[in-house]
Amino acid sequence: MTSPRRSLESSYARTLLPLAKMWRRAADRALSDMNVSASIGWALVQVSRLGDDIRQTDLASELEVTQASLVRSIDQMTAAGLVERRRDPADARVSRIRLTAHGRTLVTTIEAKFGTLRHEMLDGVSDEDLAVALRVAEQLAARFAADRER
């Protein structure tokens, strides 16, 4: 017989992946409404969040894509005037990515759209419940990070 705690753990774990997928699809729709592909939109947002001059390899890692996949997206973003790619002065083999003014403007619009999405999806969730959910998510993230380092 399963204990109430094990049952809760199982139910909680089963909701995480579908919920993450639903959240991602909703964010992708928000990008699509702006005529921005998901791959370009997420890359721009990550460059903004991680800071200008991010190494291309670090961006690929954050986006969980291959270097080859990212190169195509960066080529498209560069052609659209959204980012600049430059060589690292300390190591010419390393490419660094930086948002242009146009890219920053687009990211501001994307982040505002994501903010609206968050507000709509979390409307009606109490501050207390949201704080607990955040605490649990942060604890899980820390445990997974520690487990990955082993």
Image (cartoon, rainbow, N blue to C red):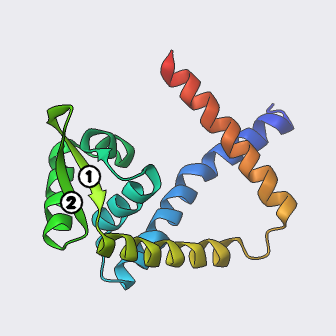
Identify the mark at residue 84; answer none if there is no mark.
2
Query: Percent x, y for residue 19?
Result: 57, 59
98 vs 148: above or below: below
SS class of the residue under badge 2? strand
Vertical placement of 47 versus 6: above or below?
Answer: below
Q: Earlier in the sequence, mark 1 or mark 2?
A: 2
Across and down, in percent, residue 39 comes to 29, 62
Position of 26 compared to 118: left or right? left
Q: Which residue is mark 1?
A: 97
Q: Tell me: residue 120, above or below residue 85.
A: below
* Marks 1 and 2 in Cβ contact (< 8 Å): yes
- Image point (48%, 59%), residue name: 21
Packing grade of label 1 (10 A; few <14, some 14-19, many >=20) is many
The number of numbered discs placed on residues in the rendered structure image is 2
Determine the residue positioned at 18% across, 74% down. 80
Residue 125 falls in which quadrant of the image? bottom right
